[in-house]
Image: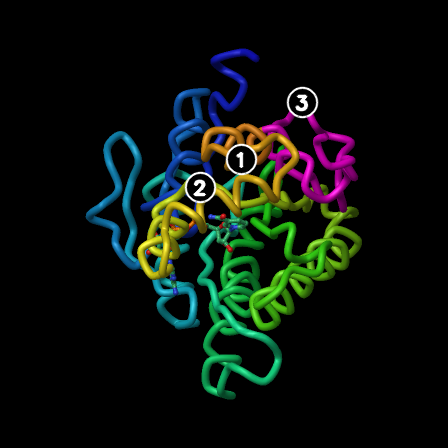
Amino acid sequence: MSRDEFSGLKAVVTGGASGIGLATAQLLADRGARVACLDLKPDDVPEPLLGVRADVTDDAGVRSAIEEAAHLLGGIDILVNNAGIGAQGAIEDNPDDEWRRVFDVNVFGIVRVTRAALPHLRRSPSAAIVNTCSVAATAGLPQRALYSATKGAVLSLTRATAADLVRDGIRVNCVNPGTVDTPWVGRLLERAEDAEAERAALEARQPMGRLVATDEVAAAIAHLASPLSASTTGTDLAVDGGMQGLRLRPRN
Ligand code: NAD
């Protein structure tokens, strides 16, 4: 892949201060893009990335953060909607407020950021949106009812938005990671009764027998965002160690 693949392009990554978002922002910058990370914690964003404070649940704040990013970058060609939060439990376990909160970040957050960025994306000759979805959108995982419902919505929203924007020259795709080795999963393991056993179970669930690396998800997002993928829209790309598509026989 050319080091200059994203040369001259400007990218905004939400949730870009940690995990998948940070790895994606760094990869896009390594390949020549100028990148702004919109996050609750902009001070955690390392140079040369630009940190811009934004809470994706605050519409006015999102609009001003997108304008600030567009001003700092000189436009927006690529939007990576990656900010997200988790939730555990079956359908009866989460109170209504938590349902509203997780949808507010994971789904309505994408709506707010995308509609604020659209005027800039419409001016780009090479516009692309990539949403961070999840294997939880395509496989039934235990104890993830609320989280999975949000990611199912992200998958449908990705396809519908791709249809609405194809004639504007804006491509819209998503990635579906399996369990990725990020601070998020670190926090999940900290809360487990037996962290080692929990990690081993998460690794065993993926046919490759290990967690996905953040750089691997970043590479998939960069692939979808790249001008080289100009005919790809409305797709979801699994980055899950085979979790969605493979059915292995148990080892003897
Ligand atoms: P992470 O916790 O390491 O990073 C998430 C970032 O989002 C943080 O920097 C956080 O400050 C930011 N953020 C959270 N709420 C925000 C808000 N309201 N406004 C702005 N920024 C906010 O998490 P991660 O594991 O890198 O996850 C990133 C995305 O990947 C999420 O959408 C998540 O659902 C998805 N995902 C993660 C995994 C996994 O196993 N880690 C698997 C599939 C999908």
Is 247 above or below relative to 60?
Answer: above
On the image, numbered disc 3 is attached to which residue? 228
Whichever of callouts 1 and 2 sits on the residue coming sooner in the sequence is 2
Q: Secondary structure at mark 3?
A: helix
Q: Secondary structure at mark 1?
A: helix
Mark 1 Cα shell of 10 Å, populated few (<14), some (14-19), many (≥20): many
- Whichever of labels 3 and 2 marks the residue nearer the N terminus, that label is 2
Q: Give the labeled residue for mark 2.
A: 20
Residue displayed at 43% across by 72% down: 59
Q: Separation of disc 3 and disc 2 at Cα?
A: 22 Å
Q: Residue at x 29, y 40 (%)?
A: 50
Q: What amino acid is found at the position of numbered circle 1 in the picture?
A: Val
Residue 240 occupies quadrant: top right
**Range covered by the magenta-colored residues:** 223-252
Q: Disc 1, ligand 1: is the CB inside 8 Å?
A: yes
Q: CA distance from mark 1 to mark 3?
A: 18 Å
> The N terminus is located in which quarter?
top right
Amino acid carrying mark 3 in the image: Leu
The residue identified by callout 1 is: 217
* In this picture, residue 106 sits left or right of residue 59: right
- In the rendered view, tell whether residue 196 sits above or below residue 226: below
In the rendered image, residue 90, in percent from the top left (x then y), is placed at: 59, 75
